[in-house]
Structures are given as C-alpha cells and as structure tokens.
Image: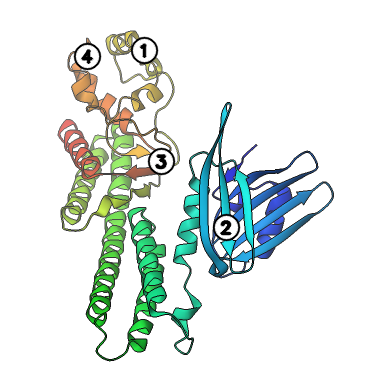
Amino acid sequence: MTQYCTQQNELPDAIRGYVVDAITEAETFRAAVKTTTGGLTQTVWLAVTSDNLFIIVSKLIDATLVSVPLTSVTSIEADRVDLPGERRREITLETVDDSFTYELHDPDGEFIDTLQTAVAAVPDPELTDPTHPTDIDHAIQNCEDVVEAAASARSDGSFDEATEQYETASTGYQTVLERLPAGDDRHDAIEAALTDIQAAQRQITELQERRETVKTRLTAAENSFQTAVRAHVNGEQTVAKIRYRQARDGFEEALELIDGDLPVFEKPIQVSSDADALAVSGPLAEFSRLSAATTDALSDKEIATVGDLHGQAAGPKAVDTDGSEPTPPVRDRFESTAIDQADVPILVALSCQRTGAISFTARSDVQRRIDQTTFGYDATV
C-alpha cells in the first residue's frame, strides 16, 4: 500500500475524499504520508498543502479531519527512528495553540522536507498588514526564510512557485521598509535584498520565455525528424531528404538559443511529436529492406527487434527513461559489426523512431539530433 503520496489521486479512497473537500481553490496539494498511529481499527494520515496541514483519522465507519493553518506552526522538529528492518521518522509540530507528535513512514524525510518548505513559504500575516504591530527582526527573518524557499523551488525547476515566493518576500521587505525608523542602519541591507529579488524574478521570467521558445522549436524540429525517419524506412527518399533538412535547421535554431547565458536545461524540456505509431516495428528479420547478413549479425548480438535497436540509440530519451548514460551513436557501434554497411542508415532511422513524449535534458541531446539529421540527409538521395 502507498504510504507517501505527492498527488491527491494517490491517496487511499477513505482519505482522498476528505482532503479534496477540505482544500480550497486557492490551495495547492503538496504531499501526504501515513503515520504509524492507530492500528487495525483506524489509520492516521498527514497531508500538507500550500496553506494547511490536515490530520485525517480514518476509522472503520467514518473519518475526521483537523485543519492546522501553516501560519500557526511555530516550529518543526524531526528525528529518525531506526527499527529492525524499517526506518521511520518522528515529527513534532508546535503551533501557537497546540503540539502534535507522530511517527511517519517517511524514511528519507521527503514529507518533512516538503512540510518545512511549505511552512517557510507561507506569507506571514504581519507582513501583509502594514497596521499590524510586529517585531522587525522577526519580520526580516520571515522574509529571509521565504527567499530561501524561493531559491529552493527555483533549483528544483518549480519556476511558478519560486516566482510567487519571491513576490511574497518582496511584499514583506517593502512592508519592513515602511516600518523601519528613519536612520535605521538596516535600510541598505533590505534595499539590497529587494534588488536581488527583482534580479532573480527577471531571470526566471527570461528563463521561462527562453524555455518556451526552445520547446516550440524543438517540437517542430522533432516532428520533422520523425516524419523523415518514417519516410526513410519506407523508402520515400525525397520526403525523407526534405524533412531531414527541415529538422536539422530547426534543431540548429534551437541550439543557438541554448548557447546563451540562461541555463535552459536547468529542468528537462519535454516535447511530443505528432507520431502515434512506429512506421516499422517487430522483428528485424521480417523487414525486407535489411539484408539477411545484417539481421543475422545483429541477432548474434541479441538485437532482434526494432525495440532492441531503440535500446542502442543515443540522444533524447522517452520520458520514462531509466536515467542511464547516453550511448554512442548507432552507426559508430556497428562499424566493427559484420553487417552490411549499406544497411547502417536504415538501422539508424529505425533506432530513432519515437512516439509520445521525449525529454531533452542537455545541449548534447540537441547536438545528437543535428548529427542524426545530417547523417540521414547525406544518406538519402
């Protein structure tokens, strides 16, 4: 049974309905985890959103839900609990009114990290109400915590969340400046922090715009490329040559945008081609355009199907990639193989067929596509 969830639909039915009913339209679900509390007659789950921590107790017949606003959480302490064959975490939350302690099925501390980040990112009501009496040092610390959470979200590729948190911190610092007495020596430091926040926000905006442009060009280029390889394996030489050239030009345009000062691949870019089926699939021995010498030689290397060829390909991967290191181009790997060298272009085209989403994770993925399109263009007449 799932004991840690990052999506609402992963929750058990007995828990999910209560969480869905409790979350407002303005809230975002973050994570949920099962605790060791209860036993045979009941289970207790903790679910954290952008605004609340929900404690859901599911009994045999009914369930109850307690909502703890994140603004009321004053401290979070966590310890590791090592048991024979199992590792858990114990968490203690102090709020302005109460205290909660639970053991969690959270061996790597993922839920606790998510909760701490969510608490740090919640705007302090003292910062959004200029008439609210406050301690300036506390307000500044709160702003610093939100900036740290924004930087963490940015490093995780959560650009929208980072932008929201930077905006919260900016509002908080502006409020602090309004409250600082004239001549207070903290003015300069806060103004410098605001300048840094504005710079970070501009960079995120520029990065998102650049990524969207790169994605658009990669999508168009990948569509042309997939059309080219399908035409190639079907013997449609003229269509293949035209599409290979279009794809190469598109990938080169995308590469020009990547070779700038913005880390475009700070988070992978996923594109989806129009192709919904492989032009050729199944056993290579049944594909008449490959010689028997080639299919026999490949079979000796345990490459008997088009799917086996996909495992030999380099470049952008299907989204469900296992994260393995890129492999050399297919044509290089078969140079020393006893296959008919005239079949290499077809093997390369077969290995490059893709359907569904493809993930570009680095500049090298785009460069490999350029190499593949150039090779395909040169191999067609």
Q: Nearer the viewer, mark 4 or mark 3?
A: 3
What amino acid does circle 2 point to?
A: Leu
The crowding category of the residue bearing disc 1, from other C-alpha atoms within 10 Å (few below 14, some 14 to 19, many at least 20), is few
- Of helix, strand and loop, which one carries label 2? strand
What amino acid does circle 1 point to?
A: Glu
Sequence-wise, which precedes: disc 4 or disc 3?
3
- Residue 366 pos. (x, y %): 23, 44
- Of helix, strand and loop, which one carries label 1? loop
Residue 340 — which label?
A: 4
* Viewer-proximal residue among 298 and 113: 113
- Separation of disc 4 and disc 3 at Cα? 32 Å
Q: Nearer the viewer, mark 2 or mark 4?
A: 2
- Separation of disc 3 and disc 2 at Cα? 38 Å
Q: Residue at x 27, y 54 (%)?
A: 217
- Separation of disc 2 and disc 4 at Cα? 68 Å
Residue 10, visible in the rendered structure: no
The crowding category of the residue bearing disc 4, from other C-alpha atoms within 10 Å (few below 14, some 14 to 19, many at least 20), is some
